[in-house]
C-alpha cells in the first residue's frame, strides 16, 4: 500500500494509458479492417477517440483536477488537446512512415514464423508501427499533462496534502 501511495499518479496514469491505448488500437483495427479505411484515416479517428477518453480519465482520476468550472475545463481541454496534437502529429506522420519503411514487415515475418497468421489483427497494416510509437507517445503525454495541462490541479492537490499533514 505504501508503494501504491508513493507512485499512485504514475500507476493510475499507466492503467488509464493502457485503456486509452486499447481504445486507440482497437478502434484503429476496426476502422482499418472492418470499414477498410486507409491507414491515415483509421489512425486519425482512433487518435481522436483515444484523446477524448484520455482527457476525462486524466482529469478525474490521474491528476485529480476536481473543478468542473467551465472556464477551467475549457482551458484544460484546449491545452490537453494542443499537447496531444503535438504527439498526435508524431503518430499521424510516424505510423504511415514507419509502415512504408517496412517496420511492420519485420513483425509480419515473426507472425508467419510462429504460424499466427490466422489471428487477423496481427497482420493489420501499420499496427506494429503504431505500437512502437505509442510507447514514446505515452511518455511524452505524461510529461505534457503533468507539467502543462494539469499543473494547477497538481499545485492544489499538493496544498491539500500539506494542509492534511499540518492537522
Image (cartoon, rainbow, N blue to C red):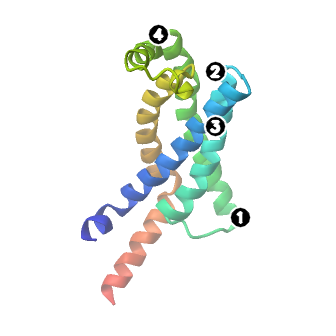
Density class for disc 2 (Cα within 10 Å; few <14, some 14-19, many ≥20) is many
The answer to whether residue 10 is above or below residue 65 is above
Q: Residue at x 38, y 15 (%)?
A: 113
Where does label 4 land, which residue?
A: 102
The residue most toward the top is 101
Q: Is residue 123 left or right of residue 138?
A: right
Density class for disc 1 (Cα within 10 Å; few <14, some 14-19, many ≥20) is few
Mark 2 vs mark 1: give the one in front.
2
| Mark nearer the N terminus (2 vs 1) | 2
User: In which quadrant of the rendered image does the N terminus lie?
Assistant: bottom left
Q: Residue at x 56, y 70 (%)?
A: 66
The quadrant holding residue 36 is top right
Where does label 3 land, which residue?
A: 27
Mark 4 vs mark 1: give the one in front.
4
Q: How far apart, in angstroms, are the residues tagged by discs 2 and 1?
A: 36 Å
Q: Secondary structure at mark 3?
A: helix
162, 59: nearer the viewer: 59
The answer to whether residue 87 is above or below residue 22 is above
The answer to whether residue 127 is above or below residue 80 is above
| Mark nearer the N terminus (2 vs 3) | 3
Q: Position of residue 154 (x, y in %)?
A: 44, 63
Where does label 2 land, which residue?
A: 39
The residue most toward the right is 35
Q: Secondary structure at mark 1?
A: helix
Density class for disc 3 (Cα within 10 Å; few <14, some 14-19, many ≥20) is many
| Mark nearer the N terminus (4 vs 3) | 3
Q: How far apart, in angstroms, are the residues tagged by discs 4 and 3?
A: 23 Å
Where does label 1 land, which residue?
A: 70
Q: Residue at x 49, y 53 (%)?
A: 16
The residue most toward the left is 2
Amino acid at each position: 500500500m505504501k508503494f501504491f501511495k508513493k507512485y499512485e499518479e504514475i500507476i493510475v496514469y499507466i492503467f488509464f494509458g493502457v485503456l486509452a491505448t486499447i481504445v486507440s488500437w482497437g478502434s484503429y483495427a476496426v476502422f482499418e479492417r472492418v470499414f477498410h479505411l486507409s491507414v491515415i484515416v483509421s489512425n486519425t479517428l482512433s487518435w481522436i477517440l483515444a484523446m477524448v477518453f484520455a482527457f476525462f480519465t486524466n482529469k478525474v482520476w490521474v491528476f485529480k483536477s476536481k473543478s468542473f468550472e467551465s472556464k477551467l475545463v475549457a482551458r484544460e481541454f484546449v491545452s490537453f488537446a494542443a499537447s496531444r496534437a503535438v504527439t498526435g502529429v508524431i503518430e499521424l506522420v510516424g505510423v504511415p512512415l514507419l509502415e512504408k519503411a517496412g517496420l511492420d514487415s519485420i513483425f509480419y515475418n515473426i507472425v508467419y514464423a510462429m504460424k499466427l497468421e490466422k489471428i487477423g489483427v496481427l497482420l493489420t497494416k501499420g499496427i506494429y508501427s503504431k505500437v512502437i510509437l505509442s510507447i514514446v507517445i505515452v511518455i511524452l503525454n505524461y510529461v505534457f499533462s503533468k507539467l502543462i495541462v494539469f499543473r494547477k490541479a497538481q499545485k492544489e492537490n499538493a496544498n491539500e496534502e500539506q494542509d492534511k499533514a499540518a492537522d
